[in-house]
Image (cartoon, rainbow, N blue to C red):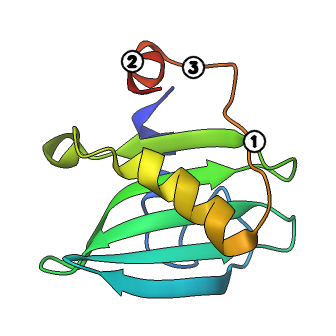
Amino acid sequence: MTNAVYDAIIQPFNQCGLMGIETVIKSEIMGPYRITLTTDSFKQHRATVKDRSTGDNISAILFDKSKTVRFKYTIPDSRGRQLTRQLFVYTEMVTKRKFYHSGNLTIGGKASN
């Protein structure tokens, strides 16, 4: 996995080069974070966590059209808070659909599951 992919999935709304034009499904404030769930015309979903104090996205998951995790990433300073795990659950809760973990995991991905 390249840093370019990780950088792409944590980009602000409609600036992720791996998604089409994004439409917000739901966006809400939860404590120090803003959680946003979007979809695009290709039926992909992206869930992001924004740190409200800095305005930067700190964690994100990109799901492909089959609702399987394509990429997930949390910036190093925010790791250990289980943010991607919470995003996964949030996505299922909001959409009321089943999403799936990928079988193709990096070493870090295997450690976090």
Q: Residue at x 58, y 40 (%)?
A: 71
Left or right: residue 65 versus residue 100 is right
Marks 1 and 2 in Cβ contact (< 8 Å): no
Q: Residues within 10 Å of mark 3 (few under 14, many from 20)?
A: some
| Residue denoted by label 2 | 111
Q: Residues within 10 Å of mark 1 (few under 14, many from 20)?
A: some
Q: Residue at x 56, y 52 (%)?
A: 88
**Which is nearer the N-term, disc 1 or disc 2?**
1
| Residue denoted by label 3 | 105
User: Relative to residue 44, is residue 6 depicted above or below?
Assistant: above
Along the line of sight, the residue nearer the viewer: 60 or 92: 92
Distance from disc 1 to disc 2, alpha carbons, whole Å, reads 18 Å
Q: Amino acid at mark 2?
A: Ala
Distance from disc 1 to disc 3, alpha carbons, whole Å, reads 12 Å
| Residue denoted by label 1 | 68
Q: Is residue 109 visible?
A: yes
Q: Amino acid at mark 3?
A: Leu
